[in-house]
Image (cartoon, grey):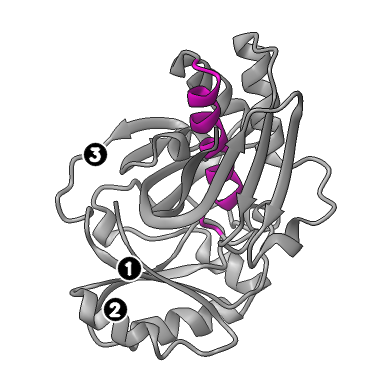
């Protein structure tokens, strides 16, 4: 028996950093949205828990000893009291350290997939998700939600303008450390998140100081016909543009510079 589960790419349509928390994390207001494309995770029954990684970005995870997918599997097994194992295979299609929740989405996919394989209560997955990372609870849902607190306090959002939107993701293939970006945030609260369309990403400025190529990507996207919203996602370096039509998005996609990664998709 082989089961598969998608790990959709995550976007922050807006991301407001409101302050630093006593626990060292940051107070956030964000709108999470998810693409119809991303990584893909497979599993087969096995005696123990193992992970094999293939795909275009597998090399970036080679030799990683603390993969979040394995941690998610081990945490779920411990929480649910599962004695069986799982042989997991990750098709790594998304760049790592790129602000689109690759690791978190993979971990969330593992929780959903193993809930099915082991026939356990989905509440166990919800219970272990927060300890795996601030984005994992949102990635577990993989639907449009508003995040507050450290990003893990979630409220579903009904917004008919989000689902089905053509989107183009572009990354200059420069990995960016989330911790390094947050460390460079200037500490200024620029106000709450009301409407995501008129919002912002407060991490863009510190991310561009670390990876100036982000500015090049944003400028390029803003110059594409039919792009009606251009922003950076998360802590970067992936940027995105929402387009007025699939045709306009596809026309831009074929023009992306060859040394940049891109993904033409839709919002779920």
Picture disc at residue 167? 1
Q: Regarding mark 2 in the picture, which secondary structure is present there? A: helix
Quadrant including the N terminus? top right
Could you tell me which residue is drawn at 72 percent across and 47 percent down? 52
Q: Does residue 182 appear to the left or right of 267 in the view shown?
A: right
Q: Residues within 10 Å of mark 2 (few under 14, many from 20)?
A: many
Disc 2 to disc 1, C-alpha distance: 7 Å
Q: Secondary structure at mark 3?
A: loop
Q: Position of residue 4 (x, y in %)?
A: 50, 41
Tell me the crowding category of disc 3: few under 14, some 14 to 19, or many 20 or more residues within 10 angstroms, Cα based.
some
The label nearer to you, 3 versus 2, is 2
Q: Where 30 sits versus 219, above or below?
A: above
Q: Tell me the residue that label 3 is attached to.
A: 157
Separation of disc 1 and disc 3 at Cα? 19 Å
Query: In the current view of this chain or complex, which residue is farthest to the left?
Result: 160
Q: Quadrant of residue 50?
A: top right
Q: In the rendering, which numbered label is found on residue 249?
A: 2
Q: Is residue 198 above or below residue 229?
A: above
Residue 168 location (% of width, % of height) = 37, 72
Helix, strand or loop at disc 1?
A: strand
Q: Is residue 151 above or below residue 32?
A: above
- Magenta residues (range): 99-119
- Residue 110 lies left or right of residue 62; in this view the side is left
Residue displayed at 65% across by 46% down: 89
């Amino acid at each position: 028996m082989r089961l598969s589960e998608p790990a959709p790419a995550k976007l922050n349509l807006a991301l407001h950093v409101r302050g630093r928390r006593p626990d060292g994390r940051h107070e956030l207001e964000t709108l999470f949205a998810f693409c119809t494309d991303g990584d893909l995770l497979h599993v087969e029954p096995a005696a123990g828990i193992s992970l094999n990684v293939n795909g275009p970005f597998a090399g970036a995870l080679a030799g990683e000893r603390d993969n979040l997918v394995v941690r998610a599997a081990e945490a779920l097994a411990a929480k649910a009291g599962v004695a069986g194992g799982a042989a997991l295979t990750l098709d790594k299609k998304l760049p790592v350290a790129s602000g689109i929740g690759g690791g978190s989405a993979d971990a969330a996919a593992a929780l959903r997939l193993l809930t099915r394989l082991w026939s356990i209560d989905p509440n166990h997955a919800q219970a272990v998700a927060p300890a795996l990372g601030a984005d994992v609870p949102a990635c577990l849902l993989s639907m449009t939600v508003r995040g507050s607190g450290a990003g893990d306090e979630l409220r579903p959002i009904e917004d008919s303008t989000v689902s089905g939107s053509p989107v183009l993701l572009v990354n200059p293939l420069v990995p960016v450390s989330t911790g390094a970006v947050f460390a460079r945030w200037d500490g200024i609260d620029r106000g709450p998140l009301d409407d995501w369309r008129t919002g912002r990403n407060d991490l863009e400025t510190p991310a561009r100081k670390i990876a100036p190529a982000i500015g090049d990507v944003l400028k390029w996207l803003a110059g594409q016909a039919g792009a009606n919203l251009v922003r950076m996602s998360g802590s970067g370096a992936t940027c995105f543009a929402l387009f007025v039509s699939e045709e306009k998005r596809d026309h831009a996609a074929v023009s992306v510079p060859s040394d940049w990664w891109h993904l033409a998709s839709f919002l779920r």
